[in-house]
Structures are given as structure tokens and as C-alpha cells.
Amino acid sequence: MPFDEINENESRAPEGTEEDAGLSGQAQEEQAQQPETENPENWRRNRLDLSKIKIATNRIKEELGKVIIGQEELMELLLAGLLSGGHVLLEGVPGIAKTLTAKLMARTLDVGFSRIQFTPDLMPSDVLGTTVFNMKTSEFSFNAGPIFSNIILIDEINRAPAKTQSALFEVMEEYQVTVDGDTYSMDFPFFVIATQNPIEQEGTYKLPEAQLDRFLIKIKLLYPSLEEEKAILRRFRSDFRMSQNAEVKAVFTAEEIRECQALIEQVHIKEELLDYIAHIIHDTRNNGDLFLGASPRASLAIMKMAKAVAAMNGRDFVTPDDIQYVAYPVLNHRIILTPEREMEGYTTEDVIKSIIQKIEVPR
């Protein structure tokens, strides 16, 4: 990953100077009591114990690596999405392990798992649940749908019509479901992983922008390299039923997820980097190549993801590289090209890259 390593000398606490020696005892005491985050010289030093996040990240990657070959970025971004408290959309052609990776990811977590196969005849009640009349008690009771779990895999989300897709609006943003006037809260954690095929259009329904915006990131998967393809064949040449999937074990609990999310919230991000994020998002709204720019939800998503990526790499502070790295998966489904640029073959990634190159990076 394109993260610059911090120079060892830079990470050390600055030693006292002659100016410090000239301070009065009271002034030195007041200076020592100031929070380290307020001192620009100390922002590079780790103040948080991130070992729990690092251990969890390595364990999950190790379990997924028992079956999945390659897809390093996919695994890293999936983990960052989970630890950021958001939802992830996977886009790629069939057969590149979108569903398999999502299922194995859920297996590494000691929480509930539910899979929903979206189809054109799927109704909102098939996802959320419905209220039924109990003849024995003469009362109405709510039968929860498959959305009531911890890790939700929605396979081929663009197969269902808009009516069913809209059933996800409330639950993905507010972590609750309202049925017949009653509200039901979701258990922690609640993490939606949805997949879609960008090639096949027959029998599919494009996700509306409002729903796309509820996904923290969209990960675009590519074909494996030649060497990875060879490794896949060698791994499964005597295992047609992929029995190795059973070797993946749960290594992360709900309570550990909660603790890691709390740690990530404390990761430090400088004021200049918050301004940097704001400039990137603002540029998408005033860009001649774009018909639709990013919302404030995108700003928050970049900040959350940058903090998660920094923590997963053992740092309790965010760098510009973190922001640039997560900008692509955060923005690629939130912006829309103008018809002219689309006809010329531009992609959203091209526009995001040009925006990042244009804006001055904070020092």
C-alpha cells in the first residue's frame, strides 16, 4: 500500500531547547499539562495502544488467506469498512470471489450472518419481515426478516426492483426498521456487504443515488494476475468442493469490534487534513467534468476510512496518503460524470485522480 513510513527520528519526542530552559517553572508546568494533540510537534507520536487492531487485522487476513488468493486490497478495505461502522458495495464480474470473500469474512467474526439473494420478485417484507396475526393469542406479532442479523450479505443487489431496494434506506442509515408504525433496532454490529455485476444489464435495476450514498465505500474488483490464477489452480486441483472453506474460523467477537471502533474514533487527524478533505469534496461540486458531486456524507466517510486505515497500519494519526488512498473507494459511486466526459471514455477514477493531483497537499 502507498503509505510513507515515518522516519524514526521524526517519531521521537522533541528534546528541550534553550527557549524551554528560559521558561518559568509555572509556565513549564502549564505547558506540560496541555494535551499532546494541541502540540504540532507531537502529532506523529503514537498515544494509543493499537495492538488490538493490528492483531485482529492480521488474524482475519490469515484466516481469509487459507482460501482467498490475492485480493489484498479487497480484504483491507472490507476490514476498514467494518471498523469504520459503514457498509460496503462490491462490484465486479462473476467468478472473482465477491460472494465467497464476503461469506468467509463473516465466518471470521463470531457474530450472526444472513444472506439475502435479491431477485426481481423479492418484496420488502421478504427482507424486513412482516406483522402476522396469531390465532392462538388473538394478537399481532412481528416476524423478523433476514435483515435482522449482524453481517448481511446481499447478493446481486441490483436484481431487485426499486421498491425492495428502498427497504434498505432506513436500516442502513439509522440501524432500525419501522414496520406498521413500530420501530425495531438492529443488534451490534450491523454490517451490510452487497455485490453487483457491472456487465450484465438484463433483469437488473440501477441503484438510485440516494441508496448508493448509504454505502461507505464501493470496491471495484479486478481479475487476478497470471501468477495468482496459477496459485488458485494449484490450491484447488484436488479440492473440487472447496473443503478448505471449513478451515476458516471465527477470530473476532462483537465486543472486540466495538473496542476497535472506539479506538479508531480516537485516532488523531490534524485540522489541516480536515480542510484537505473538505477541499477535495468541494471540488467535486464545482468540477466541469462532473454532473453530480459528493455530499457531506462523503467527507465523513473519507475521515472515518482514513482513521481506520491509519490504525490498521499501526499509526494513531492520519496522513495525506491515507486520505488519498480511501478517496477512490469512497467517491467512485457518489459522483456522476457529465454525458460529454462519459462519451469520451473518462471514468470517475480519472476525475478523482485529477482532483487529488490539483489540490495542494498539507505539510
Image (cartoon, rainbow, N blue to C red):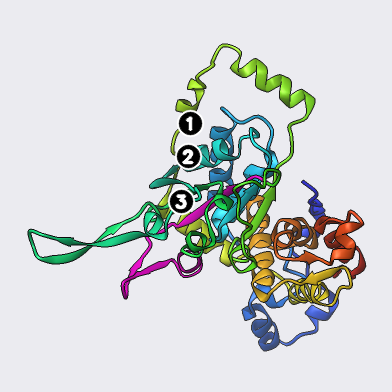
Which class describes the residues within 10 Å of circle 1: few (<14), some (14-19), or many (20+)?
some
Q: Is residue 144 left or right of residue 105?
A: left
Which class describes the residues within 10 Å of circle 3: few (<14), some (14-19), or many (20+)?
few
List the residue tagged with mark 1. 248
Quarter placement of the C terminus: bottom right
What is the span of residues highlighted in magenta in the rendered image?
169-197
Which residue type carries mark 1?
A: Val
- Mark 1–mark 3 distance (CA, rounded to whole Å): 34 Å
Mark 1 vs mark 3, foreground winner is 3
Q: Relative to the observer, which residue lies in front, 213 or 275?
A: 213
Give SS at disc 1: loop
Give SS at disc 2: loop
Which residue type carries mark 3?
A: Asp
Image spot of residue 227 (x, y percent): 77, 23
List the residue tagged with mark 3. 121
Q: Please say if the residues under marks 1 and 2 sit with CB atoms less than 8 Å apart.
A: yes
